[in-house]
Amino acid sequence: MTWIEAVVHARTLATPDIAVLDLARVDGTEFPSYTAGSHVDVHLGSGLVRQYSLCGPPGPGPYRLAVLNVANSRGGSRAMHALALGDRVRISVPRNHFPLVDARSHVLIAGGIGIAPLLAMLTHLEQTGTDYVLHYSTRTRSRAAFLDDLTANPRVRFHFDDEDPQLLLDVTRDLGDPRPDTAVYVCGPDGFMDYVVGKAEGLGWPRTALHTERFGTDLTAATASGEAGFTVRLASTGAEYLVADDQSVLDVLLDNGVDAPYSCQQGICGECVVRVLAGDPDHRDDVLTDAEHADGLFTTCSSRSHTPVLEVDL
């Protein structure tokens, strides 16, 4: 991967827990242009790479990131919040697995820090005069990032858990029945997204109209649910390795010296994708489409197996 040297040239707090970092190129040139919904990989040293959505106006930059300080962070958010003015980081060229699609109308639904990619979408939709509405849910008003910027926008609906219960997000009311040529975008914590998508599907919205982006996969969920391990087999050599209930396929491959591609290790970047040749994969990524899953593509960092043996094209 080609890395771009960047420097923190502005830093503010959108909430007590969300830092907004503006990055510029160290050499003073412009960043590559990007589209709404894009993210960048941020290399934080010692092999620590994390993905963050670009939340500024789409274009060549500067690049703006909004980062939540997560209590059970694996190191990424702590390292990002420790960055100060003038500090340098390496970032990737933007990639977009969560793009706006061609539709007459757009419904954006954000939970907490999930506002980041949707904010860039909102900016693009405003600039192009496209119909949209944004529903933004947080636990409290004080935890809503970019509140001052969004309050004056008549197309934004706020839903705060500790305020008027009648104004809580109600998918049946706020999204409603399926409408032709309307696309829905959902981003936020897993529980929030599962709730919104589940309700939407219950209303009859087709999965093709529902576009999502998650922050990653928690492997502790597998351990908590008592899932069994399985064996991953390499087609090139026939070597087999046991994947325990608290390990990913990627972890096991790297531990055994296999030259496997990867970047985010969270199921959201697509760098670790390989093809399954035998077995029934349990897909847990948020980057591949249903058609790509059906075609045998598989993320080694987050997905697992329904069968005792899974053979991959490595």
Image (cartoon, helix red, strand yellow):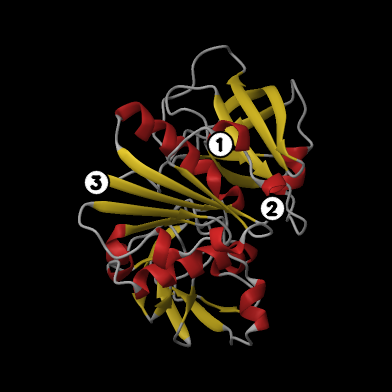
130 left or right of 306 in image: left
Q: Amino acid at mark 3?
A: Ala
Q: Residues within 10 Å of mark 3 (few under 14, many from 20)?
A: some
Report the residue that reaches farthest toward the top.
28
* Towards the viewer: 79 or 262: 79
Determine which of the numbered discs, if any, sits on residue 140 in the image.
2
What's the residue at 41%, 63% (across, down)?
Answer: 173
Q: In terms of image quadrants, where is residue 11?
A: top right
The alpha-carbon separation of the residues under discs 1 and 3 comes to 25 Å
What's the residue at 69%, 52% (across, down)?
Answer: 140
Asked if marks 2 and 3 touch (Cβ < 8 Å), the reply is: no
Lower sequence index among marks 2 and 3 = 3
User: Does the rendering let one see residue 314?
Assistant: no
Q: In terms of image quadrants, where is residue 24?
A: top right
Residue corresponding to mark 3: 103
Q: Amino acid at mark 2?
A: Thr
Residue corresponding to mark 1: 151
Lower sequence index among marks 1 and 3 = 3
Q: Amino acid at mark 1?
A: Thr
- In this view, 8 is above or below 187: above
Q: Position of residue 273 (x, y in %)?
A: 42, 59
Report the residue that reaches farthest toward the left.
180
Q: Secondary structure at mark 3?
A: loop
Lower sequence index among marks 1 and 2 = 2
What's the residue at 76%, 59% (across, down)?
Answer: 72
Q: Secondary structure at mark 1?
A: helix
198 left or right of 40 in image: left
Determine which of the numbered discs, if any, sits on residue 285 in the image.
none
Quarter of the picture containing the C terminus is bottom left
